[in-house]
Image: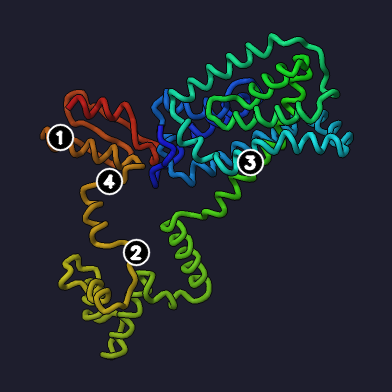
Amino acid sequence: MSARGSAGRKLNVGQAIALGALHGPAELLPISSSGHVALIPWLLHWDYDQLDDELRKSFEVVVHAGTAAALLITLRDEVDEAVRGLNARRLALIALSFAPPAVVGYSLERPIERRFGTPPTIAAALVIGAIAMAWSDRAAQERTHSEAGAADALWLGIAQACALVPGISRNGATLAAARARRFTREDANRLSRHAALPVIAGATALKGWRLKRRGLPPLEQRALEMWEHVMTHLEDDPLKLRTEVDWVIKYHMIEAYRKRHDLPLTHPRVALLDLSYHDVTRARSLYYLLERRGRLQRTVHDSDIDTAVTTPPQTTRARLRGAFIKRAKERKRDYTVDWVHLKLNDQAQRTVLCKDPFKARDDRVERLISSL
């Protein structure tokens, strides 16, 4: 499972909801939320690991923020009690439990994800975490949370740093550390919960800061800048968009021609000029003539257009449509295709309805193609 995404992949809404619903409860249990969020898509053959890096990181920020909010709501009484009882000693303990995961997360999070984010290593980490919890639970239950000291806080921090490895549960690691330090199960749970909030909030802030610092990919940034530029001038004076917007380009061309030859808008020569602008023959097209003279700006080049004729977008249902049409033509089969339907015009009239425009893979379509 690669940690590097493919540009253009979209996050399916249903999958996002499922992963979010999985992450919340998993964060409260001694199982690895990050490990399960990585393994479930792999087991179900989802494309989560192939998402655009920025999209995946944005999703992770939202999920972590949601988890932190859920913890604050669920533990509001404990949090209120802890805040009211804050003093220099407790602040020092919080700092000691926060420091190891903060240092390791800031400096090594990405290398850890790349090296240990594969299904085999995640599975191994889950097993190691389970063994550690079973072994530590053999310790005597002698201490309460109020007896926690600097060494205990530091061990909780080290445990949370270990949980940066996908498959190692943060909750499980801190429970194991607390039980190994002979805290009762109930107090170990309490220490684990209290140590969690600062780290989850810190992880959310770190991922958000990194996302903001990196910004958008160049093409997306350019698209946003162009959108803002066009919308601003459409509100101010649309005719200023004389090199960017097609109808404005044509308007200025026609108005200049009419003024030069003193022609009314209804004159046949003006109508011919209008048609000539859209001529698909590049040698005759007035559009391409204006382009050669630097009178308009293009965002899509001819090579992109030529590629699009034979290669549909690989992240939308156009991929399914293109694969179906290609195979049907190869097999010389009669077919009908529209935006959402793929239909074989045979005796069975087999039809597949593709409603989701961002679903690029569909077992029903694959079976239909394989049957040709």
Q: CA distance from mark 1 to mark 4?
A: 21 Å
Find residue 312 and name its label. Answer: 4
Among the two numbered marks 4 and 2 on one chain, the one whose residue lies closer to the N terminus = 2
Earlier residue among tags 3 and 2: 3
Q: Position of residue 127 (x, y in %)?
A: 53, 16
Q: Residue at x 44, y 34 (%)?
A: 48
Tell me the residue that label 2 is attached to. Answer: 299
Q: Earlier in the sequence, mark 1 or mark 4?
A: 4
Q: Cβ–Cβ below 8 Å for labels 3 and 1?
A: no
Amino acid, disc 4: Pro
Precedes in sequence: disc 3 or disc 1: 3
Q: Residue furthest left?
A: 332
Identify whether 16 is placed above or below 287. Answer: above
> Which label was assigned to residue 103?
3
State left or right for residue 59 relative to residue 241: right
Type of the residue with mark 1: Asp
Mark number displayed over residue 134: none
Q: CA distance from mark 4 to mark 2?
A: 18 Å
